[in-house]
Amino acid sequence: MLAVKYKDGVVIAADNLASYGSLARFTDVKRLKQFNRKAVVGFGGDVSDMQYLDRLLNSLDVEENYGGDATESEAQPHMSAKNLHAYLSKVMYKRRSDFNPLWNAMLVAGLDEADKPFLAYADLLGTTYSSPSLATGFGAHLAQPIMRRVVPTEAASQDLSKEQAVDCVKECMKVLFYRDARSMPVYSIAVIDGSGVSLKENEKLENQSWAFAEQIKGYGTQTV
């Protein structure tokens, strides 16, 4: 799972695989959850804990949208990604303090109260931090160096276009597929900006194939 900020928003992606140990067991698990028009949460780690958090966020969304005074004429503003991240970090820290942690790492991507791009991390210990590019799992080792070349600083993200950010994320997903034997070529990708959330849940790597391996000397049962 990885994400990168650009001048108007954030791009986040995660593959659709849930493994059972070393077995690639479930190949259609959507790990990006849209909270509202300002925020998307990406989950890594335990799937059952992810489902618990998803139900928790659904309850929070209902409360935010329908828990106010029905006579109010003005619509309530959407909870920002920054506020959502603060809420989730407190949930994670509370569960950790109860010695019953939720075994997840999360990226919260979206817009803050001022509609500025926001991206932050939270994990099972309640650890939080923010950066113009973030990644979890193998992405922290393989994709983060690529993203840091594109957005080395917060200021650099202000010069990055949406197209460049999407291309960077797609390139990272390609690298992760070919370098990580436990990944898959189908993934979800979301773009969050002032116009809302654009979420695609069944993106495929273009022209991905291991056919090139047949041209490598010494591959399989080839005669050299």
Image (cartoon, rainbow, N blue to C red):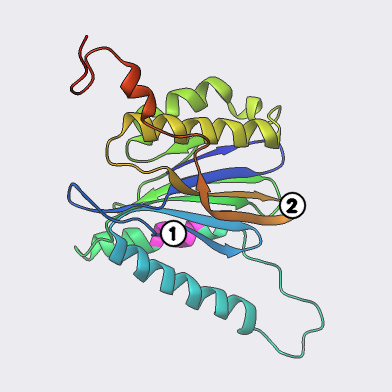
- Image quarter of residue 113: bottom right
Q: Secondary structure at mark 1?
A: loop
**Residue 7 locus on image (x, y percent):** 70, 36
**Residue 173 versus residue 23 in the image, above or below:** above
In front of the other: label 2 or label 1?
Answer: 1
Tell me the quarter of the image containing the C terminus: top left
Number of numbered discs present? 2
**Residue 14 locus on image (x, y percent):** 44, 47
Q: In the rendered structure, which amino acid carries the disc numbered 1?
A: Lys
Q: In the rendered structure, which amino acid carries the disc numbered 2?
A: Gly
- Residue 107 in the figure: left or right of residue 223: right
| Residue under label 1 | 30
Q: Viewer-proximal residue, 153 or 160? A: 160
Membership of 40 in magenta stretch: no
**Residue 190 locus on image (x, y percent):** 58, 50
Residue reaching furthest to the right: 73
Q: Residue at x 31, y 61 (%)?
A: 47
Q: Residues within 10 Å of mark 2 (few under 14, many from 20)?
A: some
| Residue under label 2 | 194
Q: Viewer-proximal residue, 33 or 222? A: 222
Q: Residue at x 65, y 56 (%)?
A: 197
Q: Residue at x 42, y 44 (%)?
A: 1
- Residue 197 in the figure: left or right of residue 218: right
**Residue 203 locus on image (x, y percent):** 53, 48
Q: Viewer-proximal residue, 46 or 125? A: 46
**Residue 98 versus residue 115 in the image, above or below:** below
In the rendered structure, which segment of residues is drawn in magenta?
A: 85-90
